[in-house]
Image (cartoon, helix red, strand yellow):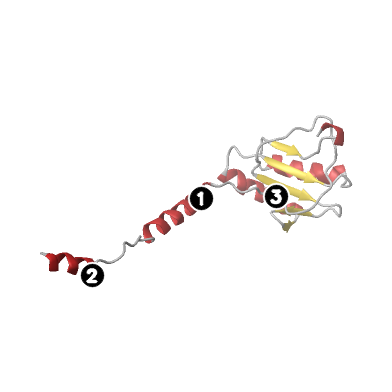
Amino acid sequence: MINVRARLRRERKPAQIDMAPMLDMVFILLIFFLVTTTFVRESGVEVERPTAQTAATVGQSGLRFGIDIEGRIFVDGHLVDMRSIRAVSERFLAQNPDGSIVIVADRQVATGLTIKVLDQCRMAGAQRIAVAAEAPAGDR
């Protein structure tokens, strides 16, 4: 009996922790958070927004058109033509019927160009359209 105990002590291996299930869980959690995260969509152009006393913070919008100081129109960082705004808006509204559209125009852009973009969005069937503005410096 003494020999059996001595042999068991010699043959005993140290305890090991299997890390594979933990790594599997970490990757599953990572995938879960990536899938459920909503990403901020920007117009893809740097603009100096006009100020407005009635500017209000709006929730995450779906589609953003950016108009820079030179009058170029951008969607998600890609330059688009005035004629394609309606098609882009229609495609967006087909995928997101309750989606909203925000026009982010530089303060130096002619009002006529902003109105043309707004009109194209309305012709596409958009009901929720806004023009981005900032609150005055004292109201922040």
Q: Identify which amino acid the numbered label 2 is placed on.
A: Arg
Q: Quadrant of the C terminus?
A: top right
Q: Position of residue 49 (x, y in %)?
A: 83, 43
Q: Position of residue 139 (x, y in %)?
A: 83, 31
Q: Position of residue 13 (x, y in %)?
A: 28, 67
Residue drawn at x 86%, y 42% as measured from the top left? 111
Nearer the observer: mark 3 or 1; the answer is 1
CA gap between label 2 and label 3 equals 66 Å
Q: Identify which amino acid the numbered label 3 is placed on.
A: Glu
Placement of 12 over or under 116, stated as above or below: below
Q: Counting residues from the N terminus, which is met first, the one under dot 1 or under dot 2?
A: 2
Q: How busy is the neighbourhood of tag 3: few (under 14 within 10 Å), some, or many (20 plus)?
A: some
Label of residue 105 in the image: none
Q: Nearer the viewer, residue 42 or 1?
A: 1
What secondary structure is found at the residue carrying circle 3? loop
Q: Are circles 1 and 2 on residues that touch, CB within 8 Å?
A: no
Extreme-top residue of the structure: 54
Q: Identify which amino acid the numbered label 1 is placed on.
A: Val
Residue corresponding to mark 1: 35
Residue corresponding to mark 3: 42
Q: Nearer the viewer, residue 85 or 132?
A: 132
What secondary structure is found at the residue carrying circle 2? helix
Residue corresponding to mark 2: 10
